[in-house]
Image (tube, rainbow, N blue to C red):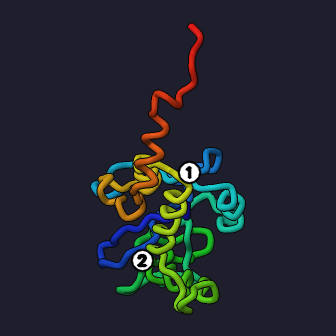
Amino acid sequence: MIIWAKTWESRDRPHLCMDVPDLDPAFCRARVTSKGGAIEYVSWATATARLLPRLLAGRATGPVFLADRRAPTRGHCAPAADDIDPTTGRGRLSYPRAENLFKQATTAHDPHGQGWTLHQLRHSSLQHLAAAGRSAPELQAKSRHQHLASLGVYVHLGAETAARVTADHDPATRRRHNW
């Protein structure tokens, strides 16, 4: 899973709110605050774990995702102190800028030539997991959706699923036990 968490700042500008101390590289996870203020964890795979050291470049504090340039230090555009990396002076990467960068990076792979959004990335991950046979509760745990009903778009249960469930629970096909 891509490690980002979206939050709304006081100026109604979304940012990627994960900070370096929120990361737990030993367990390939990060602590995030979900809607309603609950503390949850998001996990990532080995490829992400290998890229993290390059992204962090030895930093132990500040935002995980940084803008390309230094943040303004005063004026109405100056971010909060927590949104500036103390080592580099660069500001926290905004969600719209991250999405723009992702679209640019994926344009060549998108059949429509427009690039993909971060929202599409999140949903493609769930679609791949559902296609691999993961259950709705597993998808719910991975996506952090609160209601199973919201995962209906990924879990396509039809005649094949019903036939498999019936066959799996058919007493005539179960192994015989010698008691």
Mark 2 falls on what kind of element? loop
Report the side of 121 relative to 159 (left or right): right
Q: Which mark is residue 133?
A: none
Give the mark toward the camera: 1 or 2: 1
Report the side of 137 relative to 55 (left or right): left
When the figure is inspected, residue 39 is found, relative to residue 155, above or below; the finding is above
Residue at the spot 45% in from the left edge and 33% down from the top edge: 170
Task: Check disc 2 and report the residue beneath it.
Answer: 79
Which residue occupies the extreme top position in the image?
A: 179
Report the side of 136 relative to 49 (left or right): left
Specify the amino acid type for callout 2. Answer: Pro
- How many numbered dots are placed on residues in this image? 2
Residue at the spot 72% in from the left edge and 60% down from the top edge: 50
Q: Quadrant of residue 177?
A: top right
Specify the amino acid type for callout 1. Answer: Arg
Residue 87 placement (x, y as % from top left): 62, 69
Image quadrant for the N terminus? bottom right
Residue at the spot 56% in from the left edge and 92% down from the top edge: 113
Closer to us: 7 or 72: 7
When the figure is inspected, residue 37 is found, relative to residue 106, above or below; the finding is above
Report the side of 75 relative to 101 (left or right): left
Image quadrant for the C terminus? top right
Q: Quadrant of residue 79?
A: bottom left
Residue 72 placement (x, y as % from top left): 48, 84
Which residue occupies the extreme bottom position in the image?
A: 113
Q: Report how far apart the C-alphas of labels 1 and 2 lie in the structure.
A: 27 Å
Task: Check disc 1 and report the residue beneath it.
Answer: 29
